Amino acid sequence: MKRTVFWKYFFISLFLIICLFPFFWMLITSLKPEGEALLISLPTRITLDNYKNVLLQYNFYRYFLNSLIVATISAMVSTLFASLAAYAFAKKEFPLKNFLFWFFISSMMVPGLLYVIPQFLIVYQFRWINRYEGMIVPHLANVFGMFLITQFLKDVPDSLLESARIDGAPEYQIFLKIVMPLTLPVIATVFLLNFQFHWANFLWQLLVAQTESMYTVPVGLAMFKSAHEEAYALKMAASTVSLMPIVILFFLAQRYFIEGITQGALKE
Amino acid sequence: MNQRWKNSVFVIPFSVIFFVFLLFPFFYAFYLSFFKITDLSNIFGGLKFVGFRNYEFVLRDKEFLYSVWLSFKYALLMIPLNIGLSIFLAMLLRANIKVNKLYRTLFFMPFVLDAFVVGVVWTILYAGKYGFLVQLLKPLLSTKVYNTGFLGNPSTAMPAVVFAIALKNVGFGTILYTASLNNISQDIEDAAKIDGAAGLKKFVKITFPLVRNTTTFLVITGIIGAFSAFSEFFAMTGGGPIVQRWGEPLGATKVSGYYLFNHISNLRLGVASATSFILLILTLGISILYSRATKE
C-alpha cells in the first residue's frame, strides 16, 4: 500500500514539474547573461541586468505602471458597480427586475471577440483611443461578478438589513456599513478576478494603446518581442515582470481565486 | 410604487455600461455586418449598404474555411487531452487531505496567468537549433524539426500550441472534477463495490457518467475557447508557418480567432463583423448539438 502511494505522488510530482517548468525556466533565463540565454544550464553568474534594462531602457516600468493603473481602477469600479446592482437584485424589488437579470446573464453566452469592433468604434467616437478611459470604461459591467455577488447576497438574512432600516439608517449607509462588509469574501473574489482579467486584457489594450507611453505590459511585450526576436534573456525578464503580480496575488489569495472561478463554473 | 422605482437606482451604473458597451455593440456589430465602411473618420455615417456581401465574401474565403477547420482541429486535440488529464489528476488527488489540496493549488496556478505571456515563454522552449526542447530531444527529431523548432514546422506547430495550453489549463479541470467526484454519494460507490465493479470498469461504467455535467461544461467551454483562441497563437506562431493548402498559401495555425483579428487590424470592419456572427452561430450550434447529444 505504502509503495503505491509513493509511486502515485512520485508520478504526480513529475507531472507538476513539467507543468511548472516553463515558469522556472523563464526565471532562470531571465537571470542569465544574454550570451548563455539558450544554453541548457544554470546561469554561470546570476545577473539582474536584464531586469534593469527591460524596466529602464525599454520602459517596462512605464508599461507596468499603466497596467497597474488600468487593472486597479477597472477592478475597483467594476466591483463597485457589480455589488450595487447585485444588492438591488438580491434584496430589493423594482420594475423589470427579473427580466433585466435574465438579460444580463444571457449575455455571458456571447464570445467577447464579437464586441471588439463596435466597442472600438464607440471608444473612437468618444475620443478615448490611446487613453485610460478607453481601456477601462468598456469593461466596467462585469456580468459574471454581479452574478456571483447576487447569489451570495441572497443568503444574507433580511433581518440584518431590516434592523438597520428601523434604526433610520439611510440606504447608502446600509450598503456601505452592512452589505459591503457582509459580502467581503465574494467582493474580494470578484475584485481579484477583475484585476486578473484586466491585467491580461491583451487584445483590447493592443487596439486602444497607440503610442508607446500608453502601452500596458502585455502590449509592450508584444512590441518588444517583434522588435527583438533574439533577445531571449530580456524577453524572459519582461515576461517575469508581467506574470509576477498575478502569481503573487494568487498565492496570497488562492482561496478566493479558486472558489470564485469554480463556483461560477459549477453554477452554469 | 415610488419606492420601487427608487430601488432601481442601484442598477443604473451597471446598466448604463452594459447597454452602451455590451448590448448596443451586439446589435451594432450585426448592423455593421451588412455595410462597408467607406470613411473611417466618420464611422457612423461613412457606411455603404452591401447586403449579404460580407457574409458571402467570408463564406467563400478559403482562408476562412481553413481557419475554421484549424479551430476544429485545435478543439479536437485540446478537449480530449484536457479532459483526460484533468480527470486522471482529479481521481488521484480526490481525497481532501492537505497534500492533495496543495497539489491542486499548484496545478491551478498557471490557469490564472495571461495566455499571451505564457505563450511567449514557451517560444524559447520550442525554439529551433538552440532551443531547450530540440536540444533535449535531438536524437528523436528529424533535422527539419530540429532546425525550425516545434513552432516553425507545419506538422508540429499546432500540437505544440495545444500541449502548452493544455498544461496551463489542466488545474482548472482538475478542480472541477474533484468537486464533482466528491459529490458522488458514498452509497453509489459502496453499491458498485458490492457488485464487484472495480478499476477501469468501475470508472467507465459508473464514475465517468456521474461527472458528465463537468465533462459537458469543459467540452462546451472548450469549443467556445477554440473558436475565440487568439493570444496564444499570436504569441507562439503568428498564425504561421505558411503551407500550401487548397491551392493557396495559408497559415498552418491561423485559427478562426486569428482570421478575425486580421480583418479587425486591417480595419475591414464590415467583413470582421460578419465573421464574428458566423463564428457565433457556429459555436452556439456546435454547443447545442453537443449538449442535446449527451442528454442521454
Image: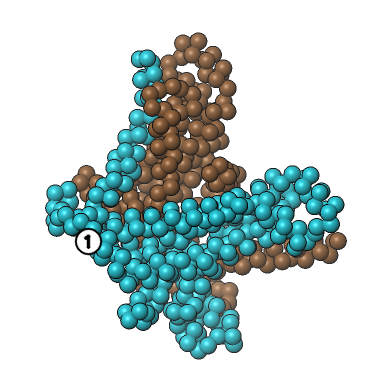
Q: Nearer the viewer, residue B72 or A244?
A: B72
Q: Residues within 10 Å of mark 1 (few under 14, many from 20)?
A: some
Q: Position of residue B58 (x, y in %)?
A: 29, 64
The foreground one among A38 and B191 is B191
- Would residue A265 be found to the left or right of residue B43 on screen? right
User: Where in the figure is residue B107, as x and y percent of width and height?
Assistant: 61, 57
User: Residue A49's image quarter?
Assistant: bottom left
Identity of the residue furthest to the bottom in this view: B143
Inspect this view and state whether residue B118 appears: yes
Instruction: Classify residue B236 as left or right of residue A185.
Output: left
Q: Is residue B52 left or right of residue A47?
A: left
- The residue lying at 31 percent from left, 46 percent from top is B26
Percent x, y for residue A37? 49, 75
Image quadrant occupied by the N terminus of chain B: top left
Q: Amino acid at mark 1?
A: Arg
Residue B246 % position (x, y): 35, 79
Rendered cyan, the chain in question is B
In the figure, the shade used to draw chain A is brown
SS for dot 1? helix
Q: Is residue B86 above or below residue A76?
A: below
Q: Is residue A81 above or below residue A17?
A: above
Q: Residue at x 46, y 61 (%)?
A: B226
Which residue is at 50% across, 85% downward?
Answer: B146
Give the quadrant of residue B19. Answer: top left
